[in-house]
Structure formats: C-alpha cells, structure tokens
Amino acid sequence: MLGIPRAGRRRSVIALVAVSTLSAFTLTSAPAQAAPPEAPVAGGAPTQSYIVQTTDAPAATYNGGVAGLAPTRVSGGAKLDSSSRNVRAYRQHLAQSRARVLDRAGLSTSKVRHDYTLVFAGFSADLTAVEAERLKRTPGVANVWKNEIVHGETFTTPEFLGLDGQTGAWRKQFGAAEKAGEGMIIGVIDSGFWPENPSFGPLPTPRKDQKVIDAKWRGSCDPGTEAPVSCNNKVIGARWYAARGISRVNPGEFDSPRDFYGHGSHTASTAAGNHDVTATINGAVAGVISGMAPAARLSIYKVLYANAAGTQSTGNSDDIVKAIDQAVADGVDVINYSIGDNDDNFSAVELAFLNAANAGIFVAASAGNAGPGASTVDNGMPWTTTVAAGTHDRSATKTLTLGNGQVFNGVGTGPQAVTAPVVDGRTSGAPGSTEQFAAQCVSNPPQLDPAKVAGKIVLCERGNNNRVDKSLAVKNAGGVGMIQFNPTPNTLNADYHAVPSIHVDLAAGTAVKAHIAEGNATATISAASNAKVRAPIVATFSSRGPGTSTGGDLLKPDIMAPGVDVVAATGPPSHSGNLWDTSSGTSMASPHIAGIAALILAKHPNWSPMMVKSALMTTASVRDNEGQAIQDEADASNANPLEMGAGQVTPKEAFDPGLVYDSGITQWLQYSCGIGVHITSGGQDTCDTVGAVDPSDFNNPTLAVGDLAGKQTLTRTVTNVSKLPALYLPTVQAPAGFKVDVSPKIIALLPGKKQTFKVTITRTTAAFGEWAFGSLRWRDLLGHDVRSAIAVRPVPAAVPLERSGEGASGQVALPVTAGYAGTLAAQGHGLQAATVDQWNLTPNPATAFNVNAPATASDIVSVTMDVPAGTKVARFATFDADYPAGTDLDIAVYRQGAGGALTLVGQSASGTSEETVTVTEPGTYVAFVDVFAAPSAVDVKLHRWAVGAGNAGNLTVTPASQPVTVGGSATVTAAWNGLTAGQRYLGVIEYTDGTTTLGRTNLMVVA
C-alpha cells in the first residue's frame, strides 16, 4: 500500500521545514498515532496539542534580514552558542513574534506549553480544532502539526568494536579508557535515568576537561517533583517534559527525570556510562561494562513514559521538539534519539534535527524494529545517522533435548540445567484466562494454572508481553523452566529469566508441540555456554530500506552497531529490581554510534556532523569476525546495504578516514527540493534560490538509485581530512548486471581540499525491479580505504506515480524515461467517478479510535468495499474542500480476512480532512473514518474508487505507442472530456513495451 498526494494540493513549509509529498501516507507497519483529544474545555470543544511553526527562521539557521539583529547561523564545523549576545537578542525577537501571532489569532499565552527558538521557531499549545485552523490562517504562521505519540524503539561490545584492549581506540587515541570522550557532552532524549546506578556515578576529580565543559555548558539539573534526581559531574544535566498528563498513564511513573521504564538508562549508559562497572542481574555477575565514551558527560532529557501496561515507553512529539531545542541551548555535542514511529516521514521533529545538525550537533537515531520487511526504516533523513542493529560476539547458547531424542540449539543465560515434564502454555491456562494470553504466558493477570504447570517446563509463545515476564509467569505458577519460541521470524534473545529458560525458533517450537502431543513429554534445558561466536549478524527485527520518502535514492539505514542482548543500566521498577539488564533493539544500537561519534569529535572538534557520519560509514566493515560476509539473521543470506547500511561500525579506522563526504544546510535544502518538498523563507520558495538535486546526487557516502532507467550518472564531492597530500585510485565492484564507470580515474588532493567526481551506472543484464549491490573504494598509499556501498534497482521505465487535473475537460503531460530500447505503449483505464458514502456525525470527545482494535462509534463510521482481481487501483479519500474550517478527519483501512479478522494496511491521519489511502491488491477492505475534531456536526463524505481495466470513454492517451531508447526521454499526454462538474474522478495510465506492464500513473481529476 502506498498513499498518494492529493490533486492540486501543495503543502508549503516555512524556514527550514520540509514535508514530503508522501509524508502522511508512507508504507508503515505501525503508524504513528495522534494523541487523543482531552475532555472538553469550558467552551465545550475538546483540545489537542499542536506544534505551531512561525515564519521566522530559528536561531540555528537565521542568516540576517531583521533590522538590528545580526545573523546567528554558524558555519560548517562550528557550534551554536546559545549564550552569545546575538543569539539572546534573536531569541527575544522570536518571543515577540510568538506574542504577535497569538494576539492576531485572539489566543491567550496561557495556551502555550513550550517555546521553541533554537532549532525550531514557534511553540506548542493546547488548542481546539477551530483555534488550530485559525492559527493556520494567521499571518506569521507557517505550519501547524497535530501532536503525535511516538515510542522508544553491553558487556563485551567495546572490545568487540575495537575500543578496549592494548591496541584499542581508547588507548591509541586517548591514552586510556578513562580519558576517552573528555570534553564531550552527549544529550540523551529518552525515558530518563536511574541516578543511583554506578554507571552514572561521579567521575574522579580534578577533571582535565572541566574548563572545556564549563565553557560550553549552559544547562541545569531539574530534580523533578516525584522521586527527585540529583546530578553530578557525570550526569551534568537532567530535564523532563510530560505534556498532557502522559506521566500519569502508568501509576508507577515519576514526575521527574527518574527512569521508571529503563529504556533511557540503557541508552545513556551504552553511550557514555562509566568504565569498568560490574553489572549484576538477578544477583549474579553478568560482566564488566562500559559506555562507548566513558569520560564524556551526559545530559538527560526525559520525554518517554511507560504506558498503562508497562510494555512500552511513549512520548509526545511537542515534548521531543522542546527537548531537542533545549539540548542545543544547553550545549551538547551529540544527541542520541532511540525513538521512532515506524513512519519515514518529515515532521516537526525532523525539522528540529535538521536545524540541530546545522547548529553543529551530531544526531544518532534508531532505524526502527519493524524488520525484516522492506521499506520499514524510520528516521530516514540525511542529516541524521540512522543505525541498524546487529549481534555481537558474546555467546549465551543452550541446547534443548526432548524426550524423543530431538536436539535443538537456542540461547539463554545461567549455569543451571533443568530436566522435567513439558507442557504447552496454550493448553495450561488458569480458569478465566484467554487461550492466547496463556500461550504467551502473561503474568498479570495470571494466565497459567498452577495445577497444570507446577514442577514442569512450559512452552511459551513470544509476543505481547515482555520476554522476561513469561518466565516470571511460569515461576509464579510453580513451573521450573521455560521454552520460549518465535511464532514468526525474529531474533533469539539471551535474557535473564526467573527460571532456567531457552529461546528457540519456530521449527523448534513446532517440534516441542508435536512432542507434547505424543504424551508424557519431557525436556532438558542445558546450562549456558559462553564461548565467542561468529558476529555481527543483522538482527531480524532491524528495520530495512529502501526508505519510502525517496524510494531508495538515499540509502538507509546508514550503519550498523550492536543491538542484541546488550547489557547496560536500567530502571529497577520495570526490571525486577535490577540495576542492569539485557535489552535488544535498534534503540540499543544507536547509542553505540552516539558514543563513538563523541570520541571522534573529541579528537576532531572542528569536524561537522556529516564529516563524522562519513568517517563512520566509509570505514565500516562488511566482514564479520571470521572474515566472512556479514549475514542476515532473517534468511541466513549475505546481508546487503538495505539491511546494514555501510556495514558494521569500526571505530579505530574512523579517526583517520582519509576522505569524507560533507554536506550542510544548502545541500539539505537542495535534497528536500529534489524530493518535491516546498520550503519557504520570508514567503519565498527557497527552491528558487538553492535549486534542487536528485536524491541520488545528494553528497552521501553511499551511492543509491531506486529507479534506474537504463543509466544514470551520480555526482559526489570528497574532502581530504588527513594532514598529508594524497593520491587516490578507485576500485569498483559493480553490482551484478551493471557496468560502473568512475571519472576522473585519479584523485590528487592537498590537505583540506575538495574534489568532485562522477559515477555512471549502466544496466546491462540486471533483472528489472530487483536490487543489486556493489561498492566503490578510493584507496591511497597511506592505507586509507574509503568505501561506498552501491545499491541500484533498475526499472524498465521511470514514470510519475501521480498526476492531477481540473475541469470537465483538460490534459496533462507525463514525462517518461526509458530503461530499454524498443516501443513504449500507453493506455488509459477509467476515468471513474467516485462512489460517495455520506453520514452526518457529531464529534464526541469521549471516543477515540484505536488502530489496534478498530470499532465504530457515534463519530466513527466504516464501509466495506470489495476490490476485484484485475483492479488497477483502489482508493479511499476525504477532502478539505468538503468541510468547514477546524474539521479533522482520519482514515484507517483494513484488509478483511477469513472469519472477519482485520489487518491494517494503511492509515492517513494528518491534522486536516485531506486524507487518502490507496491499495492495489484484490480483496475485501474495511475503511474507518474518524471525526477526530470538528466545530459542530458535519456531513462526512468518503470517496472511494476501484478502477478496473478498460477505458470509460472519457480518457484519451496519446501517442498510443512511440519508439524509445535506453535512458531516453519520452512524453505521454493524458486528456479527458465530458466529465460531470463537481465530481472527482480517478484513472490509471498504464505503460507497456507491448506485452509487459512497465509502470502506472494514477490520474485524479476534479471536474
């Protein structure tokens, strides 16, 4: 499912914000959810948090233009100083601008929750839908976003990565681990920290770097009001943000920076926890751990809070923007962001990070845990470093031996072995339990029956509750061991459990079920073996590219780091009282990169964030610790750049990369223009000033083309960051079925100088639609090896995905680039007038649509539509033009399976009534329409189409055929006539080579 932008609708954004044309409708397995409206205010209308962007530039990008106020934008490699006179003066100007906007809109300053000035110009406020709409139309306002709910996505890892040891980077670059990262401040935006954990204990004094820290630190330590925290010279700052009562959802949470859930403590200690801390779990020593930059300081920004069930930490986007803004003001050097929404879009958060990067801050972000499916990667903008997760070489293997002699390998911790009868949790439920919760061994409320479980090993299904909660449920019911199996492909995790446990795959789980069915089943779980193993391997859960915002023209994720079974600090309330625990996810991988980036910045303080990113990527390894190609856990094949980016981070080499691929604000704006984003400043489209660049030509350290038609030439520029003149020669490993040419064939550079080169990729025999991978390496005689991954997907024709038109008659030109030589044929299907379903609905603040349990209500309706086989395109849509100001509708579409089960296939939930979900597969679909907000009762109109094959007689496509050449351009014209005024029509232009379909363009016409 891929959503398409509306006909004739151009979303304009001010200053340095970009909204992708696919932002609200990208392919997503778990769409971001808008926070539900609160109860009605005195006036009767429900309020919702909104992020409001003014037309001003934030301080990070202000380049002059206001009388009496000097520019505050910094040059590449420099950091913004929030305490400088010019910045203070400009921030005062922004405060005045905000006041004027509120005054014009007739709104009180009491509605404002957060002010944003450094990386975002604007504020967040609690508004009714009518007030939000009024603000959108107020002079001085650029954009208004609805607040979204997002979620949080080491023991031997320093040694595994080459940091520790006699020849490690800590000793080589800093003299000792205790000095690694001196002078650096890492900001962690997460769920807080547990201050009593030794990983956050005070550093020895006096500190050699104290003057450096004092010169840039502008932050403070807010202890909070509940279970207050204290700071020291390790954790030098702590703040907390909890809009709309999010801290009260779980009664155990704290109104302070204290970490209840444990996610933030884990990421913070992984990035910069103290060196040589002995970690214990369940009373046993788990090992000696360290953060990546153990001498760096930490500043904590709590924005995530445990949900009601305690199974996830969630946060508000307006709190996150405030945390980013404050982190830059406080003087951090690096930000770690292990948070996501499984949606590769551009919102206020991405804007804030763009401006943070322009202020000189390196941003590491998790890629997401929605793998192994394609196009699941999150946090995919080029100014952040997006991190995939892999395994590390710490082994915790176990064996499972069944009573019938079958033996299976798995993972688990602990020296205890156990032999006992084995039962299935699914058939061992307590009275009143549900079969599924019993199968998943849920502890609260208890689902297992002690009469069936006591003294036995229990088979538990992964999913729903935390993995360690399953063994707790077994223990509480009197069980003596647990076999946990994956019902779908996923990682195997060596957690610290309440009873001896082993984690196995689906095949082993199926075998255990079969053995139980035989009767009198028994099993033996062995003690753990801790030998080193082959690593890294890409974790199954790690989200994959290509990113949906560019279709693969910008390779994401960027790099991989350890993210499976990482031992680090945690929050005792959610981890059985433990100060440390294992955890897995790209959330754990990202802080490895944040900490390593701090190390590089400590050695190269004048490097820009993108220079650091390039150094990490071009020195990354695609080989494991056995010298073999890194594997993908999901299918045991060789991993590719869509799964691991440039490869596994290798910190030692990143300090001296030789060449770097740098970029800054101008290139980021050009990239945004290249993906169809409209950016304005002072009322002018900046694309008219900076121009556009094809996303494939963005100066990224990797080379990617998601729609190569015949051949394409990419441009890159490198900078020599070594201290010596250098002579580089290229080595190309061309993707299978392609030819790759590099020009010039040699690069000669003095220190600090730049060189531009071109890479021409030509398809020869590669299969259309299939990704192929290779590499370009620039090497010199000094040992530098600058590697760029190549990822290419050839297409027979590059065609526009969507076009729109207006009027009862008219036409549009459709540009086509051919990837073959021969004949291009084109034909039209439709145009089909919309079927319109209509209801009169009144918004009800007491209801909220749950995407995981869809149901109708007084202001939520549904309609079922069959999409027959052979349908060219099907679509559900609502349109702003049909509704009064202040109306906000959302659409969620589900595929109906056997027995009526619903599976979400697409959701469109922007802050307006302009919503669209498009599907192409046949089946039965149920679309829900939610009146999220409206000034009063509204006539809701859902437009839907299922365009079948054949021309309706109102669409003409010319020419019907024309000759094309490889890489050549062609034009197809679609014309319509005889449409009924006021109706909306949808059609499809299909391109073929005479026999095979090459591509399609959806055509929306408002007559």
Image (spheres, helix red, strand yellow):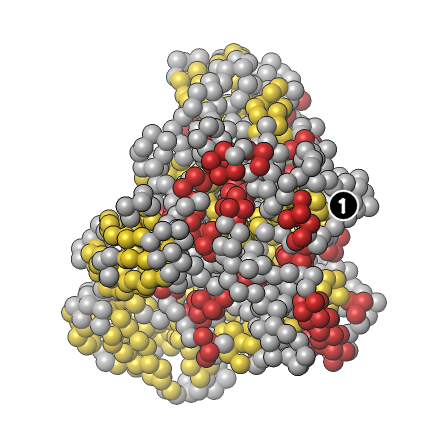
Side of 326 relative to 627 (left or right): right
**Residue 78 visible in rendering:** yes
Above or below, comparing residue 674 to residue 591 in the picture: below
Identify the residue at horizontal 60%, vertical 45% (top origin): 183
Q: Amino acid at mark 1?
A: Ser
**Residue 859 visible in rendering:** no
Most foreground residue, 298 or 340: 298
Residue 710 image point, x, y percent: 22, 64
Side of 88 relative to 949 (left or right): right
Most foreground residue, 820 or 421: 820
Identify the residue at horizontal 58%, vertical 59% (top origin): 79
Residue 433 image point, x, y percent: 64, 31
Above or below, comparing residue 636 to residue 912 in the picture: above
Identify the residue at horizontal 28%, vertical 53% (top origin): 727
Per the image, the residue denoted by label 1 is: 256
The quarter of the image holding the N terminus is: bottom left
Q: Residue furthest right?
A: 42
The quarter of the image holding the C terminus is: bottom left
Above or below, comparing residue 266 to residue 920 in the picture: above
Side of 718 relative to 153 (left or right): left
Identify the residue at horizontal 44%, vertical 20% (top origin): 531
Residue 633 image point, x, y percent: 39, 36
Q: Secondary structure at mark 1?
A: loop
